[in-house]
């Protein structure tokens, strides 16, 4: 069993700068100061932090329980999510109450572990995020059926229709809990390169299509959480554009990675373009990190887009 994120296919020789690299993060020696210099910069540049060995203390009993939550024809157990703000589990369908309670306690522990881990290793981000949903992904991704723009086997950058970020960042912590099989991803160019090439085609938001008036009104009404800024509207269009663009999907640079059993990887999925080709049984926690906490603010998707547009896209 390989303990490294294996890169299977080489990118073309003419590979541009804007591609993702895998950055292995060493375990901390006992008694070491927690902080690891430079991790925020690696993430913000569009690289993927990789920990080869399971950093989350999951008991054998809990792992066996998770692995028993198989997909069913009825489609239940599809989008199992733990919502920390409400301390609530969703997406369990007809699962017996005792199982749902156990699943909730495991996902809650994972969610809290992920927050502690990031606080320890990247203290400049600590507390400067909203801890969004944690999810459990028990379905085999290979040949999974979904409508085109919901497919995760097509390269894309993430944008949430129901949770606009206003330029805050989407940081995700994954663990492959499959005992035998890797989770296989493809990454392509980062948002930086993709925006340069495609933003105009997607349609850059016009000045005044939100801006100050939008911001003042939204603030007054207390609706910032669920109202889309021009940035959010663009990112949703961009997400769909990439998935619907068959030429891009066919011809884009592809680096293929295999995350082995027990490994953990962390990246900004609004920056790293990604697709999952195969794999079953993963844990995931999403953080919406404040755009003001960035070590490299000019690398944020909102700042990249604002440079292209020449005007603010949120406030
Ligand atoms: C995605 O965000 O596209 C899914 C990634 C995964 O489940 O491995
Ligand atoms: Fe995604």
Image (spheres, rainbow, N blue to C red):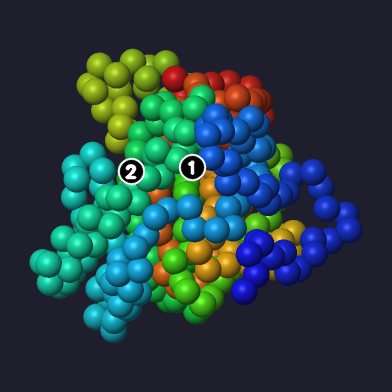
For the point 30% across and 66% down, the residue is: 62
Q: Name, please, the residue furthest toward the left.
A: 97
Q: Which mark is residue 112?
A: 2
* Count of numbered marks: 2
Task: Indicate left or right for 137 with 261 as reference.
Answer: left
Residue 158: percent from the left, percent from the top?
50, 49
For the point 88% across and 54% down, the residue is: 14
Q: 56 or 142, which lies in front?
A: 56
For the point 35% across and 68% down, the residue is: 60
Distance of label 2 from label 1 (alpha carbons): 15 Å
Q: Name, please, the residue furthest toward the front.
A: 31
For the point 58% across and 21% down, the residue is: 311
Residue 206: percent from the left, percent from the top?
54, 28
Q: Quadrant of the C terminus?
A: top left
**With respect to residue 129, does 252 lie above or below?**
below
Q: Which mark is residue 53?
A: none
Residue 273: percent from the left, percent from the top?
61, 52
Task: Indicate left or right for 209 with 155 as reference.
Answer: left
Q: Say what secondary structure mark 1 lies in.
A: strand
**With respect to residue 187, does 311 lie above or below?**
above
Q: 58 or 299, which lies in front?
A: 58
Question: In the rendered structure, which disc, 2 or 1, sits on the residue that comes first in sequence?
Answer: 2
Mark 1 Cα-neighbour bin, 10 Å: few <14, some 14–19, many ≥20: many
Mark 2 Cα-neighbour bin, 10 Å: few <14, some 14–19, many ≥20: some
**With respect to residue 97, does 42 lie above or below?**
above
Q: Which mark is residue 171?
A: 1
């Amino acid at each position: 069993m390989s303990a490294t994120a294996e890169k299977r296919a080489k990118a073309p020789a003419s590979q541009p700068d804007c591609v993702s690299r895998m950055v292995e993060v060493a375990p901390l020696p006992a008694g070491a100061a927690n902080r690891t210099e430079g991790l925020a910069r690696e993430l913000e540049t569009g690289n993927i932090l990789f920990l080869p060995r399971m950093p989350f203390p999951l008991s054998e009993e809990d792992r066996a329980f998770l692995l028993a939550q198989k997909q069913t024809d009825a489609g239940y157990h599809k989008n199992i999510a733990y919502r920390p703000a409400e301390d609530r589990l969703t997406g369990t369908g007809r699962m017996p109450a005792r199982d749902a309670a156990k699943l909730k306690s495991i996902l809650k522990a994972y969610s809290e572990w992920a927050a502690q881990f990031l606080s320890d290793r990247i203290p400049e981000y600590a507390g400067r995020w909203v801890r969004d949903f944690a999810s459990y992904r028990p379905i085999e991704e290979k040949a999974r059926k979904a409508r085109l723009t919901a497919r995760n086997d097509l390269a894309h950058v993430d944008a949430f229709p129901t949770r606009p970020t206003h330029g805050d960042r989407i940081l995700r912590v994954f663990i492959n809990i499959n005992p035998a099989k890797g989770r296989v991803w493809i990454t392509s160019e980062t948002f930086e390169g993709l925006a340069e090439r495609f933003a105009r085609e997607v349609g850059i938001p016009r000045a005044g299509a939100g801006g100050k008036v939008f911001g003042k009104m939204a603030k007054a009404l207390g609706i910032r959480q669920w109202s889309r800024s021009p940035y959010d509207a663009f990112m949703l269009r961009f997400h769909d554009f990439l998935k619907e663009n068959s030429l891009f999907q066919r011809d884009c640079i592809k680096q293929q990675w295999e995350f082995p059993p027990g490994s953990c990887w962390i990246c900004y999925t609004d920056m790293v373009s990604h697709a999952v080709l195969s794999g079953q049984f993963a844990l995931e926690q999403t953080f919406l990190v404040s755009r003001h906490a960035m070590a490299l603010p000019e690398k944020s998707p909102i700042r990249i887009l604002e440079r292209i547009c020449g005007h603010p896209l949120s406030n």
